[in-house]
Image: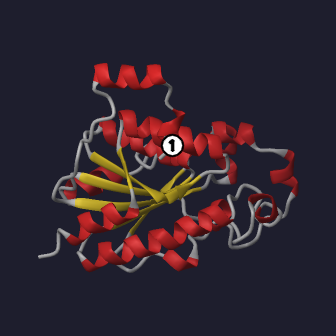
Amino acid sequence: MREDLLTGLDKAVLEVTGYGARRGTGNRPALVVIDAQNKFVGTDEPILESMKKYPISIGDQAVRAVKNIRALMEHARECGVPVFYSTSGVPASELKFNSFAKKRTPHEILTPVPADAENIVELISPGPEDVVIKKCYASAFFGTPLMSYLNTLKIDTLIVTGFVTSGCVRAFVVDAASYNFNVCVVEECVADRFQFAHDMTLLDMDIKYADVIGIDEAIGYLDSLEG
């Protein structure tokens, strides 16, 4: 996490306010994979090359994050931790009601979209026990049954991964914190199209809404739950 983005004054304000302290974790976590679809992840190439096939993709940085998500997911499943996915997509008939439609670029509209664009990346495809939440807006809580499912399982901690850091990941994290979950964002398991947005969002979430942790810490936490 880019703590070097903080000025001396910022650090002094943090010390006075107490923002940025760790919230910690509970005993009943769930792993959440936000929008790990081909259209967002793309190909294992630099972003502009990846965008030639998937116009709104991230490219190689997202592919690296997916590999880390896979490793984290294996530990979660071994420990019996439930895995939730979200996917983003708006039916054509509802585009006129959706604010994201206003952000579509000519490049995105004119570039043919591969048939598998909406699919979750194969490397981390859902298993039979996993839950996939379909959403039309940024947060996987908005207009979905996710909160009901988490309540049913008595989940108290959400381990957050996926795409993109400053968009749907952030929206989910803010809502999760508003619902009083313990929230951990795994730094190596998220990515963004814009590096500045990725760095600033991770820092801001860590200060206000979540604990931004490394993958080794996340795996250690999961492994500690065994038995």
Query: Could you tell me residue 100's position as x and y percent?
Result: 66, 41
Query: Could you tell me residue 131's position as x and y percent?
Result: 38, 67
Query: Could you tell me residue 176's position as x and y percent?
Result: 34, 43
Query: Could you tell me residue 151's position as x and y percent?
Result: 22, 52
15 on left or right of 136: left
Identify the colour scheme used: secondary structure
Q: Nearer the viewer, residue 169 or 217?
A: 217
Kind of residue at badge 1: Arg
Determine the residue located farthest toward the front in the rendered image.
8
Which residue is at a point 36% across and 78% down the rendered structure image? 74
Task: Determine crowd level at label 1: few under 14, some 14-19, many 20+ residues with C-alpha closer than 10 A.
Answer: few
Q: Which residue is mark 1?
A: 2
Q: Nearer the viewer, residue 82 or 21?
A: 21
Q: Image quadrant for the C terminus?
A: bottom left
Q: Is residue 67 among the parts visible in the rendering?
A: yes
Secondary structure category for the residue under label 1: loop
Which residue is at a point 73% across and 72% down the rendered structure image? 115
Task: Identify the image quadrant of residue 121.
Answer: bottom right
Q: Is residue 137 among the parts visible in the rendering?
A: no
> 126 above or below 196?
below
